[in-house]
Amino acid sequence: MSFLHPEYLFLLLLLIPIVIWYIWEMRKSDASLQISSHTSIRHLSSSYRVHLLHLPFVLRLLCLILLIVGLARPQVSNSWQNSSTEGIDIMLSLDVSGTMLAEDLKPNRLEAAKDVATEFILSRPNDNIGLVVFAGESFTQCPLTTDHAVLVNLFKEIKYGLIEDGTAIGLGLANAVNRIKDSETQSKVVILLTDGSNNAGDISPKTAAEIAKTFGIRVYTIGVGSHGQARIPVPTPLGTQYQVIDSEFDETTLRSIATETGGAYFRATDNNSLREIYNQIDQLEKSKIRVREYSKRQEIFPMFVGIAALLVLLELLLRHTLLRRIP
C-alpha cells in the first residue's frame, strides 16, 4: 500500500495532545465521597458501564485516525511484468591433452579450467551452452543445452586420457563450429582454451577460423600457462615422477583465430587471471533482456472513510443508550 499524499499523515501527531487533554479532563471530573470505611461495599462488583466508560473516546480516536489516513489517499497497486530474454549460444572447446596436467595453475591447468568454466556456465542461465573436448582428436562432450546442471556434471567427468594425446586445435575449433553453426540465435560464440600448438588433426586452425567467420561465429581464444617452465606429473612403474617442460604455445595462431572471427585473445598465467578472462568474456557477451512493466493503482480511501462513519454511528448509539449519562 502507498499514499498519494503521505504528508497528511503528520496530522496523526495532533492526536497526542488530544489524548493528554482527555486524560487530564477525566482526572478533573472524578467525583470523591468520604466515608468512614469501605469494608461493606468491597464485595460489590463494578458495573460493565464502568469498563466501557472510555469506549466512546476510543471510537472517536479511531475515527480521526481513519479520516486522516483516508485524507492521505491510500492506494494499492497490482503490478506485473512481461520479460523476454534473448540468450546466446556458446560452445566451449577445451584442450584435454597431457600438458594440461601442468601444475603452474592449481591444482593443474585442466582442473583450474574446469572450475572457472563451471562458474561461467552457472552465471549465464539464459544461454545455450555446449562442450567440445580435444587432444589428438575431438568429440562433443555435451551439445548445446540450457540444462546447465547436466552440463556441469559432464564437466566433472572430463579427465586426461579420454582420447588420444596431442593438440588438434583446428579440429577442436571445427567441431565446436559444426555444433553451433545452425543455431538461430543472432549471437554465436566459441571459447577455445588450450596450452599447446597445433600438432594433430586434419583441419588447420586457419581453416577452422575461416569456417567460423563464414557462419558469423566469434571465437575467443585463451592460452593457458605461466611464463617459464612448469612441472607435469608422469606415471612410472616407480610411482609418479615430474617432468619439467617449457611453458610455451602458439600465441600467434591463437591471436590470428580471434582476429579473423572478431573475437579476442587472452593469456592466463594463473587461476586469478583465468577467472578474470572469463569475467571479461561474460561482460563482452551479455544476453539482451527486454522487460515491460505494468502497474494499476486502486484508491482505497473510501473504505477508510466508510469505517470511520460506522465508528461515529456506533459511538452515538452507545452514548445515547448503554453509556448514557444523566446530568
Image: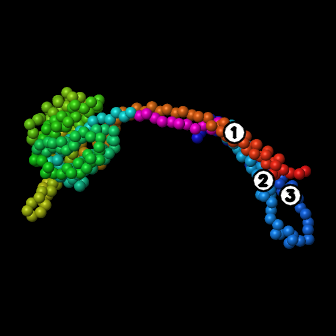
Q: Which residue bears the numbered disc 3?
A: 30
Q: Furthest residue to the top?
A: 214
Position of 297 with respect to 65 (left or right) is left
In percent of width and height, residue 281 lies at 30, 39
Using the rendered view, name the quadrant where residue 302 is placed: top right
Write down the region rendered in magenta.
73-83
Say if the magenta span includes residue 266: no
Q: Is residue 68 depicted above or below 27 in this figure?
A: above
The earlier-in-sequence mark between 1 and 2 is: 2
Q: Is residue 200 depicted above or below 153 in this figure?
A: above
Q: Secondary structure at mark 2?
A: loop
Q: Which residue bears the numbered disc 2?
A: 54
Alpha-carbon distance for marks 3 and 2?
13 Å
Q: Nearer the viewer, mark 1 or mark 2?
A: 1
Image disc number at residue 306: 1
* Residue situated in front as seen by the camera: 160 or 314: 314
Which residue corresponds to the image point at 53% horizontal and 36% vertical from the top-left? 78
